[in-house]
Image (cartoon, rainbow, N blue to C red):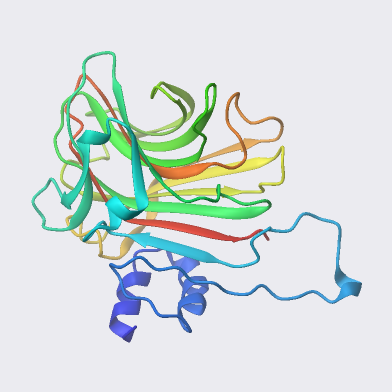
Amino acid sequence: MPPENLNRFLDNFDPGRRGFLRKIIAGAAFAPPLIASFSLEGPALPSAEATPTPVCSNQTTTIEFFDFADNEYQDNFRGILRAGDINPGTDLAGGGHTSLNFTGNTSSAGSTWLTVFDATTPLPEDACQLTLSADILISKFNNSKGAGLLALFNEATGKKGLALLVLDAGNTDVLQLVTVDQTGKLAVLKSVSLGGGILENVWYRVTMDITDTSEPNVTVTGSVTRHSLATNPNSPLLPPPIGTLALTFTGALPSGVDSTGKVGLVARAVSAVVDSSITNYTIIEAPGS
């Protein structure tokens, strides 16, 4: 990758991750916006240093990156809820950025749009760390609506997943960690007020970290951050985050949520037109620390 392209890609991540990603990418072929996967062999431990503590079953670091150009969505994702209203194109704000668009409306009962990255291996693998991130834009304001990241979702009766949502609701915007079931019903686990911080037709970086995945312990941390150029999802981030939440499960996970599952993207609306766009969706699985 030419240096200018590498720097542009790394600008999508917070400063704490850039050095780590630069080392991974340095010896690999990477050309956004195409799909890219990278592997970095973990260091082998001499037998004298081996310990019985859990280790990541996948001793590599893997990155998947999607800006939903060409056939990236059709080739790699599968719609679960309101699939006909989830389509690739250019962003709904008219900025011309390739994105995945969630459209359609709903009544006061609310509705959920959900699509999964159709990988054969559930994520995260044993004792691995998982980071999901994406740039999210909400096009119109009317009541409560937004979009976010999905993890640990399993398609079976009684099973649920975790979703991190940014919701635009006028002066009561929120960053929420929720469970989502097979029908799209949500249950809030934790919520952080963003006041009126979420503006329409502006891109925000949403990040979800899942660490300490040796059952029954799981730590989930989420954040939402502005871009230096609000209408450009490829511009550098503008720290600090405008909202951060963390939820630690020291015992059993919420009922119906397993420690591994599908990852994906989700949107939500109540008495609103959802009209949200997502781009720069990144999946990083790495050996646990």
- Residue 117 pos. (x, y %): 41, 48
Q: Is residue 112 left or right of residue 220?
A: left
Which residue sits at x=87%, y=71%?
49
Q: Nearer the viewer, residue 123 or 247?
A: 123
Which residue sits at x=86%, y=67%?
50
Q: Is residue 78 visible?
A: yes
- Residue 143 pos. (x, y %): 20, 23
Q: Is residue 279 visible?
A: no
On screen, 88 above or below 80?
below
Which residue sits at x=13%, y=45%?
92
- Residue 105 pos. (x, y %): 17, 25
Q: Nearer the viewer, residue 266 or 289?
A: 266
Marker count (numbered): 0
Q: Is residue 134 left or right of residue 106?
A: right
- Residue 228 pos. (x, y %): 25, 61
Q: Nearer the viewer, residue 266 or 196?
A: 266
Outermost residue on the right side: it is 48
For the N terminus, the image quarter is bottom left
For the C terminus, the image quarter is bottom right
On screen, 223 above or below 189?
below
Outermost residue on the top side: it is 108
Query: Based on the displayed image, in which of its 4 quarters is residue 197 positioned?
Result: top left
